[in-house]
């Protein structure tokens, strides 16, 4: 394991993903490399995360997701997408640590839940979608952290689908999506034929109580 220290200023340095009607920031070194290595090892340790291959509704058919996933959060933070309702498992200490780290740069947001996705190789993927479920409110803040193999991540405009932009989400990085991003842009993680290792992605979010929607 590498023991590389990245200065705090560099860790918090972000670049803006320049797309109209969006507010997107990319922090390539949000976690120090040795810290990111440790988190990846813990997430892959047997028994720590309750990984499952879920069945979702897609074009009227039940299909298995091309990845493993898990849903963790505070009590009452159920999450529904593609016909699947996920009930939260209580945060582990590791997931709480990441949550608190994210909230330090997002003090207005209390992240009460996280969707974990495990991409075992290049054939595991995520299709086009926006994080616009009612539980997330009008303009959700989505904090997406990545560990493991770097993968291509693509945005496309919801109306003009030829408008696209891609970035590579690298080990220890943070992608922060805010404002009206989910109204105007979809995103996806496509399959790749290139040899690639395991990747874990955690998307922290805030589930709103139904009476507040």
Image (cartoon, rainbow, N blue to C red):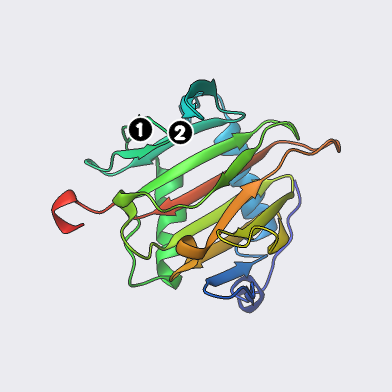
Q: Toward the viewer: 38 or 146?
A: 146
Tag 2 residue: 70
Q: In x, y percent, where is residue 9?
A: 62, 79
Q: Residues within 10 Å of mark 1 (few under 14, many from 20)?
A: some
Q: Is residue 148 visible?
A: yes
- Tell me what residue is drawn at x 62 percent, y 68 percent: 27
Residue 188 horizontal side relative to residue 60, left or right? right
Q: CA distance from mark 1 to mark 2?
A: 8 Å
Residue 121 rendering spot, x and y as whole percentages:
73, 32
* Mark 1 lies on residue: 86
Q: Is residue 112 visible?
A: no
In the visual, does 47 lie left or right of 147?
left
SS type, badge 1 = strand
Q: Left of 159 or right of it: where is 179? A: left
Q: Is residue 180 above or below residue 191?
A: below
Q: Nearer the viewer, residue 207 or 43?
A: 207
Residue at the extreme left = 211
Q: Residue furthest right?
A: 194
In the rendering, at what x and y percent does residue 87 appear?
Answer: 31, 32
Q: x, y percentage for residue 196?
A: 80, 38
- Are the residues flagged by discs 1 and 2 in contact, CB closer than 8 Å? no
SS category of the residue bearing label 2 = strand
Tell me, for residue 37, which label it has, or none: none
Which residue lies at the image location 50% right of the left edge and 22% below the top edge?
61
Q: Earlier in the sequence, mark 1 or mark 2?
A: 2
Dividing the picture into quadrants, the one containing residue 81 is top left
Q: Quadrant of the C terminus?
A: bottom left
Q: How many numbered marks does the figure carry?
A: 2
Q: Quick one: which residue is furthest to the front in this view?
A: 159
């Amino acid at each position: 394991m590498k023991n590389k220290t990245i200065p705090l200023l560099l860790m918090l340095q972000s670049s803006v993903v320049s797309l109209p009607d969006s507010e997107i920031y990319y922090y390539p070194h949000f976690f120090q490399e040795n810290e990111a290595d440790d988190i990846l090892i813990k997430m892959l340790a047997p028994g720590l995360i309750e990984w499952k291959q879920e069945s979702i509704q897609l074009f009227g058919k039940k299909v298995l997701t091309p990845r493993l996933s898990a849903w963790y959060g505070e009590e009452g933070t159920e999450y529904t997408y593609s016909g699947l309702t996920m009930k939260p498992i209580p945060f582990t200490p590791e997931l709480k640590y990441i949550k608190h780290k994210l909230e330090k740069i997002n003090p207005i947001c209390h992240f009460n839940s996280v969707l974990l996705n495990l991409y075992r190789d290049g054939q595991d993927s995520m299709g086009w979608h926006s994080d616009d479920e009612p539980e997330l409110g009008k303009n959700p803040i989505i904090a997406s952290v990545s560990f493991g193999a770097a993968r291509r991540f693509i945005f496309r405009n919801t109306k003009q689908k030829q408008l696209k932009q891609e970035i590579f989400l690298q080990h220890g990085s943070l992608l922060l999506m805010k404002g009206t991003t989910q109204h105007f842009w979809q995103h996806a993680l496509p399959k790749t034929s290139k040899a690639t290792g395991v990747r874990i992605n955690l998307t922290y979010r805030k589930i709103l109580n139904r009476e507040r929607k």
